[in-house]
Amino acid sequence: MKIVCISALLLGCLMGFSIGVDMMQGFSFSMALQNAYSPFRVMEFAELFVFFSFFSFCSVLQLKYFTAHLK
């Protein structure tokens, strides 16, 4: 139960910080909230490329790990 509460508290603090930074940059509250809930819309192409490359690399490693342990 403590882990769930601490995770929720960290999520709330980080979301609040993200919304606060966006609002200080001149975004409205609704736009800052939208940016916080959908981070892929505000990412650059290079950031998306790195993210999906890392995601696919980790997926391949997990697949190799699980197939090695099934044999």
Image: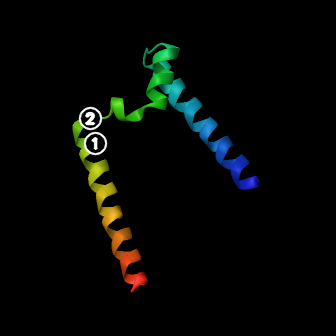
Is 44 left, or right, of 35 in this rendering?
A: left
Residue 45 figure quarter = top left
Outermost front residue? 71
The residue tagged 1 is 48
Residue 44 is tagged as 2
Crowding at mark 2 (Cα within 10 Å: few <14, some 14-19, many 20+): few
Where is residue 25 shown, x and y percent of the image? 43, 19
- What is the x, y in percent for residue 66? 41, 75
Query: At x 32% / y 34%, what residue is drawn?
Result: 43
Q: Nearer the viewer, residue 16 or 69?
A: 69
Amino acid type, residue under disc 1 in the picture: Leu
Q: Image quadrant for the N terminus? A: bottom right
Quadrant assignment for the C terminus: bottom left
Residue 31, horizontal then vertical, whole percent: 45, 17
- The secondary structure type at the circle numbered 2 is loop
Total numbered labels placed on residues in the image: 2
User: Residue 57, labelled with which disc?
Assistant: none
SS for dot 1: helix
Q: Coloured how?
A: rainbow
Amino acid type, label 2: Glu
Whole-percent x, y for residue 15 in the image:
56, 33
Q: CA distance from mark 1 to mark 2?
A: 6 Å
| Point 62% across, 36% down: residue | 13
